[in-house]
Image (cartoon, grey):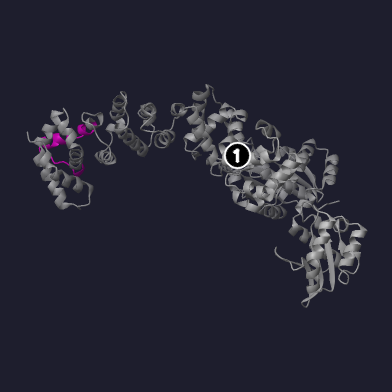
Amino acid sequence: MYDFKELDNKEFELITRDLLQEEFGVNFQTFAKGKDQGIDCLHSIDNNYEIVVQCKHYANSNFSVLFNKLKKEELKKLKRINPKRYILVTSLDLTLSNKQKILDLFEGFIKDTSDILDYNSLNNLLNNYPQVKKNYLKLWTKDSDYLDYLLNRQTHNKSKNKLKNIRKCLNIFVQTPSFIEACKKLAERNYIIITGSQGLGKTTLANVLSWKYINDDYEFIAISDIDEGWNLLEENRKQIFYYDDFLGSTQLETFRRNEDNNLIDFIEAIKNDINKKFILTSRDYILKDAESKSEKFYRTNFVTQRIQEKDFSLNIKKEIYINHITESRLPDDFKKELLKEKNVKSIALHKNYTPRIIEYITNIDNLKAHGVECANCCKQLSKFLLYNPIELWKHPFYEVLDNTKRAFLYTLYTFNGKYEYDFITLEKAVKSALFVMFGENLSGTTFNNALHFLDGFFINIDENYCITFKSPSIIDFLDFECNKNNLWETLIDFSMFYEQLDWLYYERIDYENENELLEKLVIKFTNPEFFTKLSNEDFEDNIGKMISLIDSIKSNVYDKYLFRLLTHERVRMLSTYEILELIEYLEPFNMPQNSVVLEFFINYCYPIFNKLEVKENITLEECELICAIIVRYIEQINSSANIQIKQKIFIYMDNLIRIAKEYVNNDNPNDLQSIYAGNLLDYIAILPSD
């Protein structure tokens, strides 16, 4: 027997309509939500109200409340519409006396008690028309008697265990657009692969789809490899196969011999058999990885259903919250408080809300740890976690995660919370973090296990292998931990890649107050083993960053490490144009006299002076370089102890001025060299005269 409590008011109207259409053999209209004018279902002929049906879904109420509603509101509406026949439907269990009282109230409109349908009447109709039930997911997911029957007849132990898991998830399932689409695809193509990020409900959707066909007398078979599926496949028998996480839980390395062929052959066998269905699940990025490693997979246009965040409207989020609270082990008074409409809205629709909030507050051990002893305290804890999300991650970070997983999260943090490169590089970065932070070594297995465990819990991995944090609040939590435990130096120590150090340099170091951290960064950035591996663009940017610190860093080691960088052969291979770009980049920064950087630039001038000495023509860029250095740093040159450079400038100034004038006269006045040459002419007055 069904109590219909799972159905909302609109669903109750719809199932009433479907049952009465079967019973009377006529069509009934239903209408959008809103004031119903006393009509929920209508059968009309030539605009005459032949049969009007009013639905009162009072499963959680009592007869007294129902009767008062009918007397105060519905009777007036009924007199206005005056139908030929009026049927009242309620989910309450009515006595004969209750029905007689309603009949007396609606005298002249309701002909006899058979037009007053209650809990028992509706169940009787469901028994007569069982096909209607299958259209209402919430009804058949609550059919515990049928579940018990299925479990008792199941001989395949793995499938029996899976059915128990299905039973648990049915009560909390909320129908989304993905369910409707997946039902259609599975019906048409006989198989479907459900994909999506961890934690979005792939397994739940697969479970409910399976249950839909179990209700149609399909034998349910859960498998863990394709050979098992072949062994259990039987002709002329209705069977539904279920293969959860069919490509494994981590990035696919290689297929076993002919494993991809075997899977595709099994799918083809299912597609061609009207008595078979096959449901598989996989994470987006793992399926895409498989397609890149198997030509067979790549050429197969799989039938898929991808679950996405956008599938979850605000109403669906509210329903999920309500179902989880309702089915939890919380005390009844806790549930009652958390299910108040104002609390549902303030918690389930909050911008920081995640399913982890539900998991956390419905765990009795967590409540005890926070000293929660009353319903109001539980509500306050929920709101505290929403407005202080750092607290939400503290317990799982320290009590659930091991060192490898914590190192993984700190590594992702140093990539600014977003990693979109190859996993081999990431594994190297995590390996370094694990060793520096915890003194432990990393194996490929533990890396893959960490990736799998964290996906959907602390991180998301999309179909393009891009890894991000599950929630911005995790970054807030790691910020807090790094500041509280002074971990910035450790982060610099384990960072191996330019992107990590670049993020620390720009986003997390206070130039005014953290000179020791700047010094550590300088040592990292000027290490030949590090910068020789950089791309040309990153390498030039690296030089610019290090030189620009000349204004900020107060360290005895700065010149030493900067000299190591600037005298490296890769720097000496920079073109004149690239040196000019570097000078332009450094324009905002002060350049002390006798600095390593000033000497570095001046050294580029000597080969040009040698050309001028033998009256050899110099190129536009060479002239531009000397002009730029003189214009930018003439005051430092005048104040420096470098007599040689001052003499060179003085001796060859006439030639420089002549060439500069030519560039100014002949070139576009907006060209860089014209600007430098023009500025040089303006600076003649302050050039050394002896």
Q: Which residue is mark 1?
A: 385
Instruction: Give me the residue at 49% from left, 40% from top.
Output: 420
**What type is the residue that disc 1 sits on?**
Leu
255 left or right of 546 in image: right
Magenta run includes residue 203 = no
The single residue placed furthest to the left in the displayed view is 690
Describe the element under mark 1 as helix, strand or loop. Answer: helix
Instruction: Give me the residue at 82% from left, 73% from top.
Output: 83
The single residue placed furthest to the right in the displayed view is 96
The single residue placed furthest to the top in the displayed view is 439
- Given residues 197 and 402, the one toward you in this image is 402
Q: Quadrant of the C terminus?
A: top left
Residue range corresponding to the magenta coloring:
600-621
Query: How far across and down, in percent of the image, does residue 127 sit?
Result: 87, 56
Instruction: Give me the residue at 60% from left, 39% from top.
Output: 385
Query: How far across and down, in percent of the image, does residue 175 sit?
Result: 70, 52
Main secondary structure found in the magenta portion: helix
